[in-house]
Image: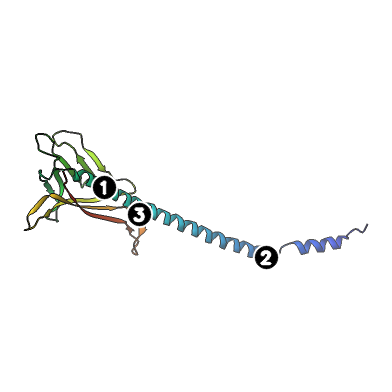
Amino acid sequence: MKLNSISDLSRSASRAAYTVVEVMMAGSISVIVLGALMTLVFQMAKEQKFGLADGSVQYKAGLVEDKIAEILRVMSVDESAVFADTVSGNPGTYRRVIFARGPSSEHPREELYFNSATGVLFHDPNRSLEGDQVALFSPDKFTALREVYFYPSLKVGNMIDNTTINVVLKFDDDGYSMRKETSGEIKKMTVNRYFTVKFRN
């Protein structure tokens, strides 16, 4: 049996080893690839956060719109709505509307009102009772309700129709998505809803 000489073994080892230049090039390529992957991961996380914020605002806006429409639709056309709490700088619009399902002898006066200081929208099913208000919307870390106002429609001849209520809702993500303007300021994702509800009872 022929044994390899020491010189043959050393030549084989030198051919199998990497040079310093090769190791540095491999390391550099690895750093570039990892950097590209990390950039991609961060971008995907940012887009996911944008999508979460946008979806939450749209969902909450739709939910509140449905709740308001559900309440107002069952009100009596014989019991005209009463508007109160005028919106400053926006004449003809109100943050509070009072209505009923039927005659006052049988049905309590109900109310929708927006507390602009807290950003909470309330439904009071009986104005004569204390503490029975239901919050239709309260702000959270994803969504803020910036403005709610109501105003009546007009009939033929420009007469006020107090049985048809126009509603405006203004939501935003309260800066959760951390989008930025070109100036570097946080940009809020906004959703506005405008709709009209007719009393049907």
Mark 1, residue position = 66
Label 2 SS: helix
Q: CA distance from mark 1 to mark 2?
A: 66 Å
Q: CA distance from mark 2 to mark 3?
A: 48 Å
Label 3 SS: helix
Q: Position of residue 77 (x, y in %)?
A: 12, 45
Residue 118 visible (yes or no)? no
Query: Contact (CB < 8 A) between labels 2 and 3?
Result: no
Q: Residue at x 47, y 56 (%)?
A: 42
The three-letter code of the residue at mark 3 reads Asp
Q: Residue at x 81, y 62 (%)?
A: 12
- Camera-side mark, 1 or 2: 1
The three-letter code of the residue at mark 2 reads Glu
Q: Residue at x 86, y 60 (%)?
A: 6
Residue 155: image quadrant is bottom left
Q: Residue furthest right?
A: 1
